[in-house]
Amino acid sequence: MSRQKIIITLSLKDQKFLEQLLSKGTAPARTIRRAQILLNSNRKGKKQYTAEELADLLSTKKQTVSRVLKEYEVSGIECIYRKKRKTPPVESKITGEVEAHVIAMACHNPPEGYCRWTLRLLSERMVQMNYIDKISHTTVGKILKENSLKPHLVEEWCIPKEQSADFAACMEDVLEVYSRPYDERFPVVCMDEKPLQLLADARQGRRKKNGALIQDSEYVRNGTCSIFLFTEPLAGFRHAKALEHRTKTDWAKQMKWLADEVYPNAEKIIMVCDNLNTHDKSSFYETFPPAEALRLAKRFEFHYTPKHGSWLDIAEIELSALSKQCLGKRRIDNLEDLNSELEKWHTDRNAMQKGVDWQFTTDDARIKLKHLYPIVTF
């Protein structure tokens, strides 16, 4: 076996290039290894090695050292890079017609028995429909991505896409109410309801050392209830109470409590709510004697949000805060405990005087929601 020292002569330019390459350390491992071989074989280096010694030093093979030195003599510094293989172009089976079939299929409803399209389902159906003999789900994914298609998503809308004079009329009515200045004689009150399931733990949970709650995924159903929430945005007031049902009678009694206990001195209570069939003056007549029903009906001035316009009800904001701050993911199994928690929540929130600064005006609506307004020609 030859023990001859291996020596090459690197130009100053090549030497500096290799040294900078190694100092950065960002090149591929193969490139770095070849650069080390060239630098350690340089005639101007401090020490010369045999092929075996250099291979041991760099944890590689003797044949690799010899091959790198020979390639350097032929192609120069470019030998440290991996050569691109010259392969003949392969004609793709994914033609424009195949892409069109994938797009058309993704833009239609999924087959019966499936809730949505998946990449694998699309690739399988493409083969079943004889559009192509074979196509991978990754290829289908690339086609969808290139065409900005997302058939797996389900988008919801709360504002109509087409003209709706009814929506515009109810929206502007509510926005006009929100633009009124604060007047304790005519308080503006928003109300909404939230159904809730009463749940009990099947087994007692516990907390870990890091504070996380561990609870059994199994639970016991204890029925349902409905949370009535009232809020006066300009006064920073809200009140939440859970009842077993949400019938017309339940709603009427809550309205009587609002009129007689909360706003006994108000000349008229301006009420904003959705158009649920229980939110009507007829509920007073189904619950109280005619004289009492008429008295209560005169105390209120109702303004209804449009269908699909629950976002116009400020009580929705308070319900969202209630869900996050008070209810969360915990389990409450009875009305008494639930109402105790609700009372503590709204009492604390009222003490902090958290109000709602409504910014969306009628002028904004006529610009941003212009498509809702019918086109009137004179």
Image (tube, rainbow, N blue to C red):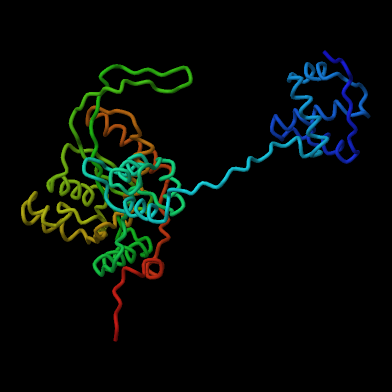
> Which quarter of the figure is the C terminus placed in?
bottom left
Q: Is residue 286 above or below residue 377?
A: above
Residue 40 in the figure: left or right of residue 176: right
Looking at this view, is 119 or 139 the one in front?
A: 139
Q: Residue at the bottom extreme?
A: 378
Occupied quadrant, residue 44: top right
Q: Position of residue 87 (x, y in %)?
A: 59, 43
Q: Is residue 268 visible?
A: no
Q: Residue 277: which quarter of the image?
A: bottom left
The reply to whether residue 38 is in sight is yes
Quarter location, residue 123: top left
Q: Quadrant of the N terminus?
A: top right
Numbered label tally: 0
Q: Residue at x 33, y 29 (%)?
A: 330
Image location of residue 233, percent across then percent down: 36, 53
Picture coordinates of residue 224, whole percent (x, y): 19, 34
* Residue 11 percent coordinates (x, y): 90, 38
For image coordinates 79% across by 39% down, the residue present is 75
Looking at the image, which residue sits at the far top? Answer: 1
Establish if 2 lies above or below 103. above
Q: Is residue 43 left or right of residue 236?
A: right
